[in-house]
Amino acid sequence: MVLPRVRRALRAGFEQLAPQLPARQLSQITFDGGSAAALLDQFKPDTAYVVVGGNYANSTNRGPGDLKVSWKWKSSLRFSRVEADQNKYKQVLSQVNFYMKQHGARYGYILTNTEFVAVKRLNSNGRLAVANPIPWTSGSIGQPSVLLGLWYLGMLVAENNNWALTA
């Protein structure tokens, strides 16, 4: 349900921007399964933002994503008083950070059946900024939806001079 909708929204956005892509230093991006990007050391994130027309064997995943079920991970675990819950929270962030580091990506995300959480690598030491979660139930005036968040992430990774975290 998610992949085709985000893919279609990105395609429509890039069709409108087509004449301006070179001047704005943007690449046309699509949203797909993790196998759409290069497989590095046999590790594959669940989803990938890749440049349209790229080769599956060597396409960089500009925005790796991890899909989880909410009973295994949710953003509220961060504030749990139970250490095991905090460790679960950190483990998933560590996994996304690993994928981002592998591909040199500045952006990544976690998507569950209840929320979307965008992640940004701030430096090459693995320091992360974790966005406020967007619940699937949001999406009205002044509230972004999960699909809008995924589309926006796709637009961020389209920036040729900003998607990668350089050392």
Image (cartoon, rainbow, N blue to C red):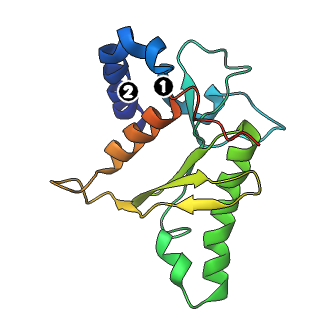
**Lateral position of residue 116 relative to residue 93, left or right:** left
Give whichever of discs 2 and 1 has the lower sequence position.
2
Q: Which residue is mark 1?
A: 30
Quadrant where the image shows the N terminus? top left
Q: Which residue is mark 2?
A: 10
**Residue 128: x and y, percent?**
62, 60
Report the residue at 47% width, 76% height from top. 76
Give the total of numbered labels: 2
For residue 16, above or below residue 104: above
Report the residue at 70% width, 46% height from top. 99
CB under 8 Å between discs 2 and 1 = yes
- Mark 1 is on which residue type? Thr
Element type at marker 2? helix
For residue 74, above or below residue 162: below
For residue 132, above or below residue 25: below
Residue 141 shows in the view: yes
Report the residue at 66% width, 28% height from top. 37
Report the residue at 70% width, 60% height from top. 94
**Residue 57: x and y, percent?**
73, 19
**Residue 65: x and y, percent?**
57, 45
Image mark for residue 122: none
**Lateral position of residue 74 relative to residue 126, left or right:** left
**Lateral position of residue 20 relative to residue 139, left or right:** right
